[in-house]
Amino acid sequence: MPSDLAILSGAGALPPDLANAYPDALCITFTGIAHSLTGRTEDHSFDRLGSLFTTLKERGIRRVVLAGSMHRPALNPENFDAFMLQIAPQLVAAFKLGDDGLLRFVIKMFETQGFTVCGAHELLPELTATAGIVSQVAPLPEHLEDIDRGLALLGLLSEADIGQSSVFENGLCLGVETLQGTDALLGFVAQTPPHLRRGHRGVLVKAPKTGQDLRVDMPAIGPDTIRAVQVAGLAGLAIAAGRVLVLEPDQTRALVSEFGLFFVAREI
């Protein structure tokens, strides 16, 4: 029986993991958006979403999952189909609401068309971590204090729709994630002058924003994150239990062990 699932793919390791787990799913890519799928895919344009919805319905698709990183597309109104022309005013308004507002609009758009929007964590629950110490190395009491401070700051920043990560060291904030992403944050931390980093090594803290819809914008870490944590001179990382994806989990945990880092999942 054909699958009723469609994987709408962006870049990164998550879409291939989903495609491997659900080999009968319909894999959709988008013109101008990088992706890492290697099997059979169908390409669609954001300028012609009406065509996409027609395809999904003709294929018997009932569930969709948006997976992988995507930048905001450069839309060309001259190429809009009838559906895009119809929703253009609402889309323009959604673009002004920040990432969360735009993603809520996208979810509502798919649901209005009769599709169920699934989260990758619902389809691959093994990619999240349960609460506890994931690594062989345990955080010190001072690290736990830094984690508490990092989570508290992320809670305050949620209302401003700013980032999903912070770095704390010796009770001080070395940086917060902004539009440039976690790798940029950790690169910035790595360049912090040594005289500002006296004391114990710090921690990367990653958690979703308050009220964030995890179906389409769930925070994620992976091997590259662990390498960047090491280069930044941090002692480890803490994530929200069950609410942050751990991509390529075997390699991620292997690097945590290789670098002697601690890795904690916190219930929040």
Image (cartoon, rainbow, N blue to C red):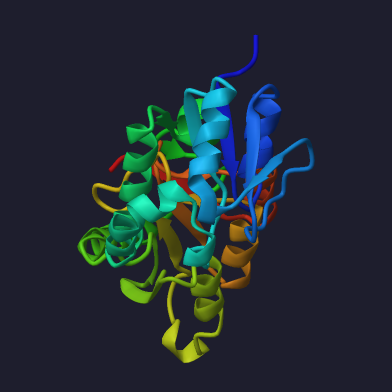
Q: Is residue 206 left or right of residue 258?
A: left
Q: Is residue 247 left or right of residue 100?
A: right
Residue 81, above or below 26: below
Residue 164, above or below 173: above
Residue 121, above or below 207: above
Q: Is residue 142 left or right of residue 189?
A: left
Residue that appears at 29% across and 67% down:
96
Q: How many marks?
A: 0
Residue that appears at 57% across and 71% down:
233
To which quarter of the image does residue 178 belong?
A: bottom left
Residue that appears at 56% across and 76% down:
187
Say which quadrant the N terminus sits in.
Answer: top right
Q: Nearer the viewer, residue 105 or 69?
A: 105
Q: Is residue 47 left or right of residue 87?
A: right
Q: Position of residue 155 (x, y in %)?
A: 23, 58
Residue 154, above or below 39: below
Q: Position of residue 129 (x, y in %)?
A: 47, 36
Q: Position of residue 175 (x, y in %)?
A: 40, 75
Q: Nearer the viewer, residue 199 or 23?
A: 23
Q: Position of residue 245 (x, y in %)?
A: 50, 43
Residue that appears at 29% across and 61% down:
154
Say which quadrant the C terminus sits in.
Answer: top left
Q: Nearer the viewer, residue 106 or 84?
A: 84
Does the image show residue 76? no
Does the image show residue 260? yes
